[in-house]
Amino acid sequence: MTTPPPLQPLLRDQRKVDADHLKLLAVFHYVLGGLAVLGLGFLLLHWFMMNAFVGNPEMWKDPSGKGAPPPPQAFFAIFKWFYLFMGTMIVVAGVSNVVSGLCIQARRGRVFSLIVAGINCLCFPFGTVLGVFTFVVLLRESVAEVYEAAGRPAA
């Protein structure tokens, strides 16, 4: 019969793998937070363009002289609520990803990071990949032990 390998080196290897994965998770959460800033910039650019198009009735006139009516202002008024809602969602997602990255670095707030991972799964494709990877790493028993150890006061 062969004897199993000693347990201590395996634990050390798993701790190193966990530390590397947690470091990557934190970095990827920061990256997704940065992408949220980029998305917010795109949303603002889109709003300014729509505002310019709807607010300039001369642009909507037909060159043949028939005079096509400009788009209704009520449509853009409703669209402003869409922009506000989406902008709020992007800011909340970006801030929560940055805070989750900070929590992962500090080995605190594991449940918060899992909740953010669930929300990230809705943001296809990058958020989905990050959310699944976050679940895989943070739900490991060895990672849960690391978080528990970080939460205990030093003896």
Image: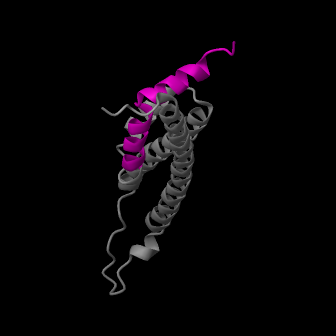
- Whole-percent x and y of residue 55? 48, 64
Q: Where, quadrant-wise, is the C terminus in this rendering?
A: top right
Residue 57: quarter of image = bottom left
Q: Where, quadrant-wise, is the N terminus in this rendering?
A: top left
Report the residue that reaches farthest toward the front.
1
Q: Is residue 124 magenta?
A: no
- Position above or below: 45 against 74: below
Main SS, magenta residues: helix
Q: Residue at x 59, y 19 (%)?
A: 151
Q: Which residues are magenta?
A: 127-155
Q: Is residue 133 magenta?
A: yes
- Whole-percent x and y of residue 97? 52, 41
Report the residue that reaches farthest toward the bottom.
64
Report the residue that reaches farthest toward the top.
155
Q: Nearer the viewer, residue 5 or 126?
A: 5
Q: Residue at x 32, y 74 (%)?
A: 68
Q: Residue at x 58, y 29 (%)?
A: 107
Q: Nearer the viewer, residue 85 or 74?
A: 85
Q: Nearer the viewer, residue 126 or 17?
A: 17
- Position above or below: 36 against 101: below
Q: Residue at x 49, y 66 (%)?
A: 49
- Whole-percent x and y of residue 95? 56, 40
Report the label total. Answer: 0
